[in-house]
Image (cartoon, rainbow, N blue to C red):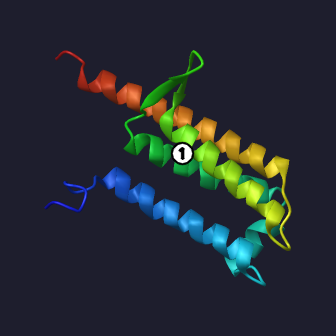
Amino acid sequence: MNSILGKRPSLAWCLTAGFGLFCLGVIVLANFSATYPMFIASVRQLPGGDKTAHFLLVGVLALLLNSAMNAATVRVAGLTFLKGNLILVLLATLEELSNLIQPGRTFSLLDLQFNYLGIFAFGWMSLWFAKRQARIIHRPM
C-alpha cells in the first residue's frame, strides 16, 4: 500500500516517529504543565533521574533515527558524522535553549551534555548494528 510519500513507511520509521512523538509529549508536559505528571515527577525525584532521562530518551531516539536512516553519514570539515545525530544535536540544542525564554524553566548545560552523550553513545550503537548487519548479509556461505 502506498502512502502520501509514495511507499509505505518501514517499521523503523514508524517506531522512530512514535518514540519521537512520545519524547515531544514529555517535553510539552515538562515545559507547559503547572504540575508534572506522576511519571515525570517520579523520575525527577530519583538521584540523577533527570540526567538519566535526558541520556536515555534522546539516546534511544538517536538509535531509532539512525537505524531508520540506515546509519547514513555525512562529512563535515573532514569529519564523518551520522546524519541522525546531527539532526538530534540541533533539535536538542534548540529545545534546551528554548528554556531561556520560557517562564519557570531554566537552561542547563548539564542537561544538554547528557542529551549529547545519549545521542553519541546510542548513535555509535546504531552504527555498530548497521556494520554488523552488513557483515552478516554479505558473509559468503
Give the vertical position of 20 relative to 91 (above or below). below
**Viewer-side residue, 121 vs 82:** 82
Question: In the rendered image of this protein, does residue 128 appear above or below residue 40?
Answer: above
- Can residue 114 be seen in the rendering of this structure? yes
| Residue 108 in the image, given as x and y percentages of width and height | 84, 53
Q: Position of residue 99 (x, y in %)?
A: 79, 62
Residue 36: image x %, image y %? Answer: 75, 79
The spot of residue 4 in percent (x, y) is 23, 62
In this image, 14 relative to 58: left or right?
left
Asked if 61 appears above or below 122 in the picture, the reply is below
- For the question of whether residue 46 can be seen, the reply is no
Q: In the orientation shown, which residue stands out farthest toward the bottom?
A: 34
Q: Amino acid at mark 1?
A: Ala
Neighbor class of circle 1 (other Cα within 10 Å; few <14, some 14-19, many 20+) is many
Q: Nearer the viewer, residue 101 or 30?
A: 101
Would residue 121 be found to the left or right of residue 35 on screen? left
- Classify 105 as above or below 8: below
Res 6 quadrant in image? bottom left
- Residue at 21 percent across and 62 percent down: it is 3
| Residue 25 falls left or right of residue 102 | left
Quarter where residue 40 is shown: bottom right
Q: Tell me the element at label 1.
A: helix
Q: Is residue 127 left or right of residue 60?
A: left
Tally the numbered discs: 1
Residue drawn at x 28%, y 52% as measured from the top left: 10
Q: From the image, tell me which residue sits under label 1.
A: 62
Q: Spot the residue most to the left.
A: 1
Which quadrant is home to the C terminus? top left
Image quarter hosting the N terminus: bottom left
